[in-house]
Image (cartoon, rainbow, N blue to C red):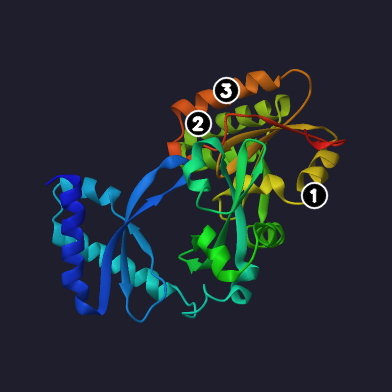
Amino acid sequence: MNYQEFLDACVDSVKKIVGKEAEVVIHRVTKNNGIVLDGLVIMEHSRHFAPTIYLNDYYAKYLAGCGIDDIAARIYRLYLSSCNNLTLPDDFFLDFEKLKDQIAFRLISYERNRELLKKIPHRRWKDLAIIYFVVCDNIDRERAVVTIYNNHLKLWDVTEKILYELAMKNTPRLYKAVLRPMNQVVSEMILKESNEDSIEELLEHVNKMNEEFPMYVLSNEMKTQGAACMLYDGLLAKFTNHIEADVYIIPSSIHEVILIPIDGEVTKEGLADMVKSVNQTELSVEEILSDEVYVFTRKNGFE
């Protein structure tokens, strides 16, 4: 069966499992950078919210020989697991007072997300857009989050300015920043992946490179949407004062940025060429943040 027939078959099979206790529908969801996914939603009549389970990867499992009923059973188990880990009152998303401390922000490309930005409150920052979401709960050390749309603002009778002020205050608390030297990050990767005979030599090489060309990785404890950390109030000012240098900021993905002290040897143009190349050849489309390189100085902040 083709992909659309697969989607219809999944809905029918899940409906047989849930019976009349819930509606089962497919929603097309626009993700970062224009990626569109098909999400299956099981909405029980007694609930006001439900997790979205994306089916695109399940189609590959079907093509590899997995049966529709087996896939439907997996989807239902995932649904039950997600629901059991959510401990929210049913009116949580209806009452702004109950969720205002859980509003956070992330960064996405402005140009790559023009269609999505028509539907959601946002604020432009350079070539990026600041967008907002609600942190609902922890699920297996990950977080259930819901993107805030324009219709939510009408429901809550609030403005984008209010979201911005809350998100700028909440996000550093909900997603604590982590700033580490690049050699520490790479060393941890080497220790996980290399055989024992090569570890010592590789670590020595990495540490030597960091002395000659220091770099730092900025993300958050969750290691997701960590590029937003560069907008945390006072973080880059304290860092640049500490190292006594201005920095280039490389948006390596939506999840992290790389900070490089400006020393006159490396040019912004050269770094931008590298970023474009990595975006085109190494990253998935959904993880790309920007082709630009930003500058933060001790005197002027972002330039």
Q: How crowded is mark 3: few (under 14 residues within 10 Å), some or many (20 or more)?
A: some
**Which residue type does callout 3 highlight?**
Met
Q: Distance between the residues labelled 2 and 3?
A: 28 Å
* Residue 171 figure quarter: bottom right
Q: What element carries label 1?
A: loop
Dot 3 corresponds to which residue?
Answer: 274
267 relative position to 60: left or right: right
| Residue lying at 66% horizontally and 50% vertically, measured from the top left | 178
| Residue lying at 47% horizontally and 77% vertically, measured from the top left | 87
**Which residue type does callout 2 highlight?**
Ser
Q: Residues within 10 Å of mark 2 (few under 14, many from 20)?
A: few
Q: Name the N-terminal-most of marks 3 and 1.
A: 1
Q: Name the N-terminal-most of marks 1 and 2.
A: 2
Q: Name the N-terminal-most of marks 2 and 3.
A: 2
**Which residue type does callout 1 highlight?**
Gly
* Residue 218 figure quarter: top right
Residues at marks 1 and 2 touching, judged by CB atoms closer than 8 Å? no
Name the foreground residue: 146 vs 194.
146
Relative to 166, is 90 above or below?
below
Relative to 133, is 265 above or below?
above
Q: Distance between the residues labelled 1 and 2?
A: 40 Å
Dot 1 corresponds to which residue?
Answer: 234
64 relative position to 115: left or right: left
Q: What element carries label 3?
A: helix
Image coordinates of residue 98 in percent, x first then y, are: 60, 76
Q: What element carries label 2?
A: helix
